[in-house]
Image: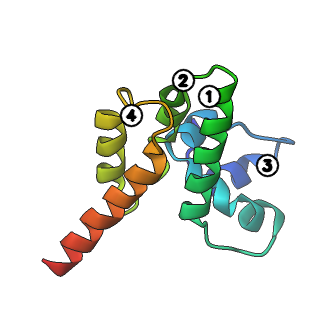
Amino acid sequence: GIKTLAEAQAHLVHVDGVMMGREVYANPSILADIDHHIYGGVERPLDYQAVIQKMQEYTHDQHALGAKPWHIARHMLGLFQGRPGARHWRRYLSENGPKAPVGQPILLEAYDAMMEAASFARKN
């Protein structure tokens, strides 16, 4: 049930490691700060576009091995959890991902749709 890096740090005073599986699945971007908060590394902003591009490439490669693209892409639903545009990201993937034809860059399309919705919201 550990949901924050602060909670993880509090446990690490007493144990050698903590498991954040559920939280990481629901909010994968929490791992972007782990090196800084737990190990004292340099804080770097997460490049969401690079993550999406890499996952799109991975999805394509795994499809060549027989995996269905949606079976990989669906695990990306929580990528923008708690961030502006997260609802648009989830909605686009949920509505279009399961029926997307093979080869369709569904993750990149979802990102573009989210960014377009955010741009529209800022203008209005």
Q: Left of 109 or right of it: where is 79?
A: right
- Where disc 1 sits, the SS reads helix
In primary-sequence order, the first of circles 4 and 2 is 2
Residue 118 drawn above or below residue 10: below
On the image, which quarter does residue 61 sit in?
top right
- Where disc 2 sits, the SS reads loop
In primary-sequence order, the first of circles 2 and 1 is 1
Which numbered tag is attached to residue 97? 4
The structure residue drawn at horizontal position 81% and vertical position 70%, both measured from the top left corner, is 40
- The type of residue carrying mark 3 is Leu
Label 1 belongs to which residue?
63
Residue 48 drawn above or below residue 18: below
**Direction top: furthest residue:** 66
- Where disc 3 sits, the SS reads helix
Which numbered tag is attached to residue 12? 3
- The type of residue carrying mark 1 is His
The structure residue drawn at horizontal position 82% and vertical position 44%, both measured from the top left corner, is 14
- Where disc 4 sits, the SS reads loop
The structure residue drawn at horizontal position 27% and vertical position 73%, both measured from the top left corner, is 119
CA gap, disc 3 to disc 1?
39 Å
